Image: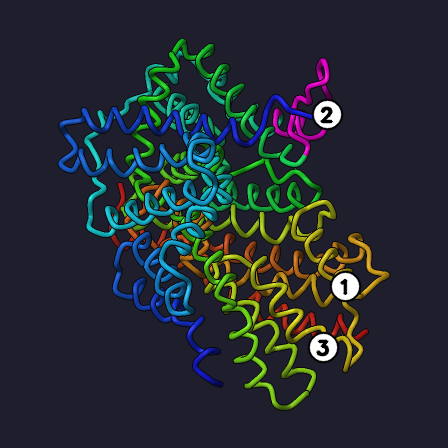
């Protein structure tokens, strides 16, 4: 069954938004690198907006090659320092804050409400044979709808316009800069690692340092493997199958009789301790640092290290006892 | 180990060195991907195809950009000022107490299946950070840069830690379903998602206590910054 709100359409909307922003950057004379910055965002917009068109025109293989080349070019532009930022007019919202008061909170607070209504209440609802939400991506669709509803509410409350909203998003995109794209680049690296079977090599390395099958040693090694592999991949979900199938199931479960449920639950948490301390988990650690305009790019990670280290040892202890009750 | 086992790892030292040398992370990451692909013998055109395919598959990570227009517009019309002013009216509010409330609320909401409450773009930047800064400023006067950095980093950290350690309890969350599917694929039956979620609770409580204890020291740290560098 076809659907009204699909991820393809949301991605197209993001692409269109970035394309408009790229044009605005091109005309922004206060940005010393406006041409390369606009090229950077223009290429991203192309990849998001026209991927399906490119596939229809030249087929999947050629389309993916073109997008791949665009992605490499984007990385080179950023690597050569081609992404700059313009000067934004300073904001003084005190007067309008006094005028609008608590109404200003309504659009932000509507976001979670709309996400929950759409993902729980409107799941599987169809109009005239067309599903409202693509059933495999309801949460993503709900998030998109929530963003649009919140924008409509914000325009209504502030009497601002969507054009003004786009201008403001340019200010935020300028502030975040290349970090906005980093999560997608890391997903690419994860894909290349998977194709190169990097996980197998890491599994081999881990097994080499575990000649002795002693319970605490293997528990500590599994947790360490989860954390370190997650730090490399930036994602505990990528580390989990490799470390669990390679180390935890054959030795801890089959040989030593561990209970799999606490083993995997706590093993995943050991991976999250890695997520908290790696720049590779860009959407959690690097994008917020840019978004909050921190001077220290690694400020968020630094704030998380003590908790991550403490939780790492807590997880080893918990696994040692709870998996063998 | 033989060469074929080591070559797939070539990206790892490249990434570490690249970040250590503070090269641009986009270049480091894509460079490491290209080096790894070529090292294991993927042809250049196939590698470009793989990169393009993975980019298309990862587009959902750009979804936060959809949130920028509404947040930007609200900021232009004074959302941050309003959040700071609103919180400054509560005489007992301090940055540490507000952040503690947010952290506990965030972890519990994620644990009962409401991870969409919160978010770095929709909550932390426009609402939480102005409230923390507003409360601290009302108590201590103008904050030195060090305190502003500390408050902002702590806000982002509380958001991440609350989310991570809360959501694994909820049985319909992706991680729990992933673990469940993985166990069944590997021939281990008789474990249901509820069991996995329950065993996540001890770690979740430990995270609540450990990070909560750290947040409870935030006010003192900010006061120390202000005393050292000079506020008012």
Residue A121 badge: 2
Residues indicated by labels 3 and 1 sit on the same polypeptide chain: yes
- The scheme the figure's colours follow is rainbow
Q: Residue at x 56, y 59 (%)?
A: A238
In the rendered view, does A116 fall on the left or right side of B221?
right
Q: Chain of mark 2?
A: A
**Dot in front, 2 or 3:** 3
**Where's residue A195, x and y in %?**
50, 61
Q: Residue at x 30, y 64 (%)?
A: B18
Q: Residue at x 20, y 51 (%)?
A: A80
Residues indicated by labels 2 and 1 sit on the same polypeptide chain: yes
| Front in this rendered view, residue A196 or B126 | A196
How far is disc 2 from disc 3 in space, using C-alphas? 43 Å
Mark 1, residue position: A261
The secondary structure type at the circle numbered 1 is helix
Q: Assess whether mark 1 and mark 3 are in contact (beta carbons under 8 angstroms).
A: no
Q: Which residues are magenta?
A: A114-135
Q: Earlier in the sequence, mark 3 or mark 1?
A: 3
Q: Chain of mark 3?
A: A
């Amino acid at each position: 069954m076809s659907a009204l709100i699909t991820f393809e359409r949301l991605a197209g909307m993001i692409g269109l938004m970035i394309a408009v922003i790229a044009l605005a950057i091109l005309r922004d004379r206060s940005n010393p690198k406006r041409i390369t910055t606009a090229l950077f965002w223009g290429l991203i917009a192309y990849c998001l907006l026209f991927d399906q068109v490119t596939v229809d025109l030249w087929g999947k293989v050629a389309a993916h090659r073109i997008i791949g080349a665009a992605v490499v070019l984007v990385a080179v532009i950023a690597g050569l320092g081609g992404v700059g930022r313009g000067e934004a007019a300073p904001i003084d919202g005190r007067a309008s804050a006094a005028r609008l008061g608590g109404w200003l909170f309504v659009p932000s607070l509507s976001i979670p409400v709309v996400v929950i209504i759409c993902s729980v209440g409107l799941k599987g609802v169809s109009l005239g044979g067309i599903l409202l939400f693509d059933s495999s991506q309801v949460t993503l669709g709900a998030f998109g709808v929530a963003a649009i509803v919140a924008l409509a509410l914000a325009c209504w409350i502030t009497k601002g316009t969507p054009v003004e909203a786009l201008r403001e998003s340019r200010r935020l995109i300028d502030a975040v800069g290349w970090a906005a794209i980093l999560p997608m680049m890391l997903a690419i690296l994860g894909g290349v690692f998977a194709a190169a079977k990097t996980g197998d090599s890491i599994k081999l390395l881990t097994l080499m340092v575990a000649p002795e099958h002693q319970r605490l040693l293997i528990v500590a090694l599994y947790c360490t493997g989860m954390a370190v592999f997650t730090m490399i991949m930036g994602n505990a979900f990528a580390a989990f199958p490799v470390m669990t199938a390679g180390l935890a199931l054959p030795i801890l479960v089959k040989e030593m009789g561990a209970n799999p449920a606490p083993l995997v639950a706590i093993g995943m948490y050991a991976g999250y301790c890695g997520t908290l301390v790696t720049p590779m988990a860009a959407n959690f650690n690097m994008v917020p640092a840019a978004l909050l305009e921190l001077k220290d790019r690694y400020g968020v990670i630094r704030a998380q290290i003590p908790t991550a280290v403490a939780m790492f040892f807590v997880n080893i202890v918990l696994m040692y006892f709870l998996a063998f009750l | 180990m033989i060469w074929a086992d080591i070559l797939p790892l070539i990206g790892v030292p490249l990434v570490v060195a690249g970040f250590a040398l503070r090269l641009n992370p986009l270049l480091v990451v894509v460079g490491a991907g290209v080096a790894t692909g070529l090292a294991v013998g993927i042809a250049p055109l196939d590698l470009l195809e793989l990169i393009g395919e993975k980019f298309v598959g990862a587009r959902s990570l750009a979804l936060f950009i959809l949130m920028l227009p509404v947040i930007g517009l609200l900021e232009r019309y004074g959302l941050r000022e309003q959040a700071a002013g609103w919180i400054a009216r509560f005489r007992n509010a301090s940055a540490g107490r507000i952040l503690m409330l947010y952290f506990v609320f965030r972890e519990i909401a994620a644990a009962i299946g409401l991870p969409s409450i919160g978010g770095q773009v929709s909550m932390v930047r426009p609402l939480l950070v102005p409230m923390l800064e507003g409360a601290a400023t009302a108590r201590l006067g103008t904050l030195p840069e060090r305190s502003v950095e500390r408050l902002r980093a702590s806000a982002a950290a509380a958001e991440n830690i609350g989310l991570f350690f809360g959501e694994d309890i909820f049985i319909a969350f992706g991680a729990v379903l992933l673990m469940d599917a993985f166990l069944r694929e590997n021939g281990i039956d008789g474990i249901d998602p509820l069991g996995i979620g329950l065993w996540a609770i001890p770690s979740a409580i430990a995270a609540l206590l450990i990070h909560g204890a750290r947040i409870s020291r935030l006010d003192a740290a900010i006061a120390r910054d202000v005393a050292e560098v000079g506020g008012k």
